[in-house]
Image (cartoon, rainbow, N blue to C red):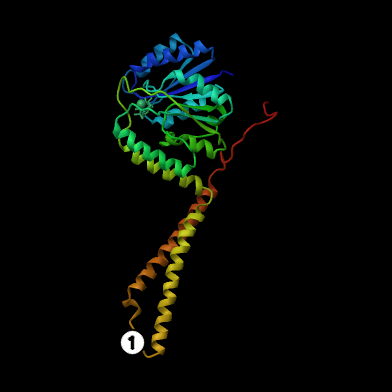
Amino acid sequence: MIQISVVIPVFNEEESLPELTHWISRVMDTHGFSYEIILINDGSTDRSWEVLQELSLRNNRIKGLNFTRNYGKSAALDAGFKRAQGEVVITMDADLQDSPDEIPDLYKMVKDGLDVVSGWKKERHDPISKTIPSKFFNGVTRWISGIQLHDFNCGLKAYRNKVVKNITVYGEMHRYIPLLAKWSGFPKIGEKVVQHQARKYGYSKFGLERFLNGFLDLITVSFVHKYKKKPMHFFGLLGTFSFMTGFLITLWLIFDKIYSLRNGMKVREIVDQPLFFLALVALIIGVQLFVTGFIAELMTSSQSKEAEYKIDEEINFDF
Ligand code: UDP
Ligand code: MG
């Protein structure tokens, strides 16, 4: 087994690739690591793929995957993870913002027992429109996940091979890989302060929409994680609450009417009262939430059971 796989998503980074791969190879050779560099071309419209082909001719440890179109950073990482053979898998961005000089320390931290080591760009070289929302994003993510990282979205991370083989990165989930790792049973998550440079070539592929998308993804990822196996717990709770509210109001209306009639007080028509309509709406919404919960339960129970559990090790299985 080789020691290190470096997984790099590439989207229109033709200028950076030669410098990046040379730098990585230099670091690996200096430290005597066995390695592979897996570059995933995520539908670049520039010459990235051609550059990559040339580079791989000169160094057979440079491996390339070419997507048919732009699928996004998460998909690129996932494809790289599925193929990575190294004991330690290191991801980094292709734009030279992350320094390959961090590789030896990251490798050591994983070898010393951590499942995931996340880079922390303590001193960032990005515009302020990016750094301030990023602080907020990281705070919310810490709070929801309970994982004490400063910089979830850092492209530079290291994983034990087993970790990347047991998670699926989809959608825009590349920002939440530490959460995915923790929920898949890999809780030893550490952090390392890393050097960060301003982008040398090209342009950033993520604009301000990243923060809204990131936030929506966070809600999805925490919701799905919590209720995937038991959607009725979510819908049922809301449904019960709504139904009970409607039911109690109805009881009150009936009681009020009977009481007033008995005591010869002035009575209002039930349909003249706002409370009646509130009760009606609450009852209907309650029932609807319940039905939604049932349907969600039916869907989850009819889903294939594939990959619902994680296998840590297998013995005597090789044929
Ligand atoms: N990237 C990708 N597919 C995309 C967008 C980005 O593979 O659709 C890659 C990009 O080439 C880079 C990494 O993801 O290697 C991070 O992108 P970028 O540097 O633009 O993000 P930022 O540093 O601005 O967060
Ligand atoms: Mg970048």
Q: Which residue is mark 1?
A: 266
> In the rendered structure, which amino acid carries the disc numbered 1?
Lys
Secondary structure category for the residue under label 1: loop
Quarter occupied by the C terminus: top right
Q: How many marks?
A: 1
Above or below — where is 287 with respect to 208? below
Residue at 48%, 20% in the rendered image:
103
Asked if 222 appears above or below 43 in the picture, the reply is below
Task: Identify the image quadrant of residue 97.
Answer: top left
Q: Residue furthest right?
A: 316
Q: At which x and y percent is residue 47?
A: 33, 17
Taking the view exactly as shown, the residue that stands out farthest to the top is: 58
Give the residue displayed 41% in from the left and 43% down from the top: 140
Relative to 160, residue 49 above or below: above
In the rendering, at what x and y percent does residue 290 appear? 47, 60
Q: Residue at x 47, y 34 (%)?
A: 177
Quarter of the picture containing the N terminus is top right
